[in-house]
Structures are given as structure tokens and as C-alpha cells.
Amino acid sequence: MSTLFNYILKIGDDSLILGHRLSEWCGHGPILEEDIAMTNIALDLVGQATTLLNYAGEMEGKGRDADALAFLRFDREYRNLLLVEQPNGDFGMTMMRQFLFDAYRLPLLERLQKSSDVSLAAIAEKSLKETKYHLKHSSEWVIRLGDGTEESHRRVQDALDTLWRYTDELFQEDDAEKELVVSGVIPPMSEIREAWNANVNRVLEEATLTIPTNNWKHSGGRKGMHSEHLGYILAELQYMQRAYPNMEW
Amino acid sequence: MKELNLNELERRFQEKIDKDIKIEPNDWMPENYRQTLIRQISQHAHSEIVGMLPEGNWITRAPNLRRKAVLLAKVQDEAGHGLYLYSATETLGADREETIDDLHSGKAKYSSIFNYPTLTWADMGAIGWLVDGAAIMNQVPLCRCSYGPYARAMVRVCKEESFHQRQGFEIMTTLANGTPEQKAMAQDALNRFWWPALMMFGPNDADSKHTEQSMRWKIKRHSNDELRQQFVDVTVPQAEMIGLTVPDKDLKFNEQTGHYEYGEINWDEFWEVVKGNGPCNKDRIDVRRKAKEDGEWVREAANAFAEKRARKKSA
């Protein structure tokens, strides 16, 4: 059970932290339609985080619900990818971050639908529809910006160069997860990587973008070794629960 | 077909209005009617968009996941309202980007309430309860407005506003029934937002320069003071119900009229905020302007891309 708890925490934290980042855009988008789209995606991600973290809490069996897990852990206990905690930057950076994540999340959810854990399968099925739309939206923007103007091409190529180093972590698998793969609870990450590669190559090519040659790979988020950015996210996220503990809202 | 003179066109137009027949985009309308609507609808659209900022200010700090999701949904609704309303101005021949430029230059106004800061979580409750509550009072009659596209947009907007008002009141109720700190937070928010909420209905009837003509055209159905009174009558018992005190020492119920009498509104403050001297006027407009400037390269890219694709298709 604790193995599954740890795994669900990871994907739940991804949704939570990326949803937080996207919600920072609210009211500041480049066009009104994108304010609506980004708020909508943030809302989906907060919803996914709630479902996943509630289930993680059930698996843990210590009486923690989604709110307790989202708001009352310490920095080193968060398990999200380094990618999702990276700052929004410009709109190109945000869309590239979203695209690299969505292209991983979609094949993951597709396979989790067939998980031997029926609850996880049901959660994946429900989230999949949303994530399909997220990937469509982020892919279209990566292509539009990549193949738009010189300036947009330069900006979104910069974003790719900056974020590429965080993509290897998407597919890392620890020993406990290898057991979950064997019991059919989660898919092998090699499959997800293959699907991701195919999709990312296709979209980046259409966007006329170049995959960085610098292959330096950062990881650590999955083990609670985060970038300096996470602390500030948590300072905001947890502010009310820390300042006014044990209250109903 | 004989050419109709202006007086005859105006007579027929007013006749339609008097018979409660909706005016549609392609119908003839007096230029003043068109301009009044453009002014009012774009002001309404700007209020929705600027109104995203004070609430957006608390999304990342919402106290739990449910509140965060509800607040995100609410702010998203507001962006959606802005979009319909800008579209409604376009049916009158206005250009969305020009309309937005008027907001940024200070030429166009938006609801003054959004020039007050949101300082605590309780402000999310106060805004939903009071600000959306006041907006509903203003907007429900607009569902019967003589201009078809605006009236229809308002039907949908009002449904969502009513959900917003309820979620705000629910936040206030939870806080008022919570710990002493929470109740104090709720009371403080009511203290700060009560008077600005009353000001949302605009100047007293005697000082309202647009009311008379707008009522004749059925753009407006009730005067500012009538709507303000209705709001006070509905809201004061709600405050009492949850044990909060309306910050007005002159407030009392008049048994004879069946209405609450309330104290004098600080009109100096109202006009100062309208003129741009409220606590957040500059911040709000700076933020909106920056969003537009920062997004320029994105919009250029989207246009360039669309053109490239169109050329490819036709080639």
C-alpha cells in the first residue's frame, strides 16, 4: 500500500504544483481566450490533484485527506517533477512546460486506465478527457509560436532549451515502482518515454524547433530534492493553513 | 420606396421600444442609443476583466482545494462574461481592441469597486456576497433590456452571478460561524466592502446624467436609488442572519415604508475613485496594460502563423 501511496503522491503533486503555476496567470494572459483556457486547465489540474491526493490519503490510512496532503507537508515531502515547479516565464515558456508535461501525462493516463488497481484506473479514465484537451491546446501553441514570427520562434526555442534538462526525470522509475509495474498497477516508464518521444518529435518538427544537444539531466523532485522555486510556491499555497491552523474554511 | 426621414425613423424606433420589441444588430437605431449601449456594455465588459484581478489575487492562497477550485471557476466565468460582452459591443460596430485601448488610456470606466484591495481571504466572501449581489440587482433588469444581444447575454451572466453570490455568502457564513479570528476577518471585510458596494449603483438619481434617457430607451428599467434600496433591503437581514454588523450607525428599519433607511454615502470618495484616485486604480490598469504589452508577440505570432497556413492551403 505504501508503494502505491508514494506513486500516487507523485502524480497528484504534479497536478497540484502545475495547477498552481498556471493559476498564477489568471488575469495576465496575452488574450482573453487564453485567460479562460489557462484558468480552465488550472481548474482541471486542481481537480485531478484533489482526486489523486484523496486516494493517496486513503492508501496511506493515516486519516490524511487531499487538503492535509496538499497544504500540510514540508518542502522535502513533495514529490512533483522539477519540470512543473519551474517559473512561468513568458507565455512561450508556460506553453512549452505544459506541452512537455501533457505529452507525458496523456500516455500515462491512457495506460493507467487499464491498471489492475480499479480505483486508479477510474481516476485515470476521468482525467484522460481533460488531459487530451490540454495536450491539444499546448501542442497547438508550441507549433504556432515555433512557426510564427522570428521573435516567437526564438522565445519558444529558448524555453525548450531551458526546460529540456528536466524531461528525463519524467521517466525515472525506482525499485518500488518496478514492483508496481510487475503487478500491473502502473505501466513501464519505457513505454511512456516511447510515446512521449514520438509525440514530442512530431510537434517540435512541425514547430520548426530544434531539440537541444545539451543532454544534461536534472532530477530530484521525485525524491523531494526540489529547486529553490518550490519553497515560494508552498509559502503561498500553505499560507492560510499555516497562519490559521485547524480551522474550517 | 420612399425615403424615411430621421424623425420618422426615430418615431418607429421608439414605438418598437414601447411595445417591448427587441432591437437587433441590423435594425435602425439612433446614434445616441448605439453609443450609450457601447459605453455601457464595454464598461460592463471591462468590469468583468478588471474584476478578475482582486479575486485572482487569492487563488494561489485559497485555504483549501475546494475553495481554490470554486474561486478559479468563478474567475473563469468572469473572463467568459467579458468575452460575451465584448462580442455584444461588436454587434454594435465597436472594435474589441479599440475598446480595450480606451480602458487602458483611462477614457473608459469600469466598476469602481475593483479599485479596492483584497487584503484577506474573507474579501473573497465579501466580494461574492456584496459585489456579485449588487451586480445581480443591476443585471437582472438588464435581461429585459431593449437591445437583444445584451439582454440575452445577461440571462446567462445572471445565472452564473447568482452562483457567485451564493458561494460568497457561504464563505462569509463559514467564517462568521468559525473561530473568533475568522469572525473578525469576516466583519473587517464587511466593514471595508459595504460602502463601496452601495456606491456600485452609481450616483443619486438627481446626479445621474444618463438615467432618464436610458429609461426611456428601456436600456435601464430602475433608477440607481431604487436598485440601491433593493440591495440594502435584501442584504441587511442576511448580515443579521450570520451575526455580522453592517457598518452604518444610521441604519434602521422603517416599519411604515417597509424599507431600511441608511446613512449618507461618502460621495467625495466615490468621485475620487471614479476619477482614478482609488487605492488600486493605477495598479489595476498597469496590470492590464502590461498583460496586453507582454502578449503582443504572442498575438503577432498567432497572426503570422495563421497567414502562413492560409498561404500553404491556397498554394
Image (spheres, helix red, strand yellow):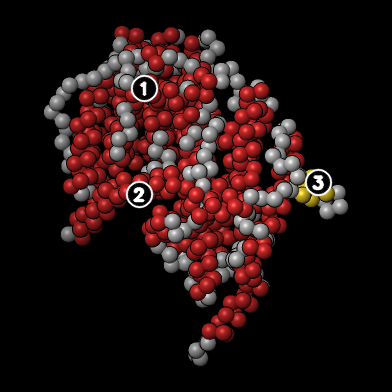
User: In terms of sequence position, does the residue under pointer 2 or pointer 3 come before the other?
Assistant: 3
Question: What is the quadrant of residue A163 in the picture?
Answer: top left
Query: Which residue corresponds to the image point at 18% horizontal and 39% vertical from the top-left?
Result: A209
Mark 2, Cα crowd under 10 Å, few <14 / some 14-19 / many 20+, is: many
The kind of residue on which mark 3 rests is Phe
Residue occupying the far left of the picture: A213
Residue on which the image places disc 2: B292
Q: What is the CA distance from the residue labelled 1 to the residue labelled 2?
A: 28 Å
The kind of residue on which mark 2 rests is Lys
Residue on which the image places disc 3: B253
Q: Position of residue B192 (x, y in %)?
A: 61, 39
Label 2 vs label 3, nearer the camera: 3
Label 3 vs label 1, nearer the camera: 3
Q: Position of residue B2 (x, y in %)?
A: 51, 91
Residue occupying the far bottom of the picture: B2
Q: Position of residue B306 (x, y in %)?
A: 26, 54
Query: Which residue corresponds to the image point at 40% horizontal and 13% vertical from the top-left?
Result: A77
Q: What is the CA distance from the residue labelled 2 to the residue labelled 3?
A: 48 Å
Q: Secondary structure at mark 3?
A: strand
Out of A59 and B77, give the one closest to the viewer: B77
Mark 1 and 2 residues: CB-CB less than 8 Å, in contact? no
In the rendered image, the quadrant that contains the N terminus of chain A is top left
Residue on which the image places disc 1: A230
Q: Position of residue A41 (x, y in %)?
A: 41, 36
Mark 3 and 1 residues: CB-CB less than 8 Å, in contact? no
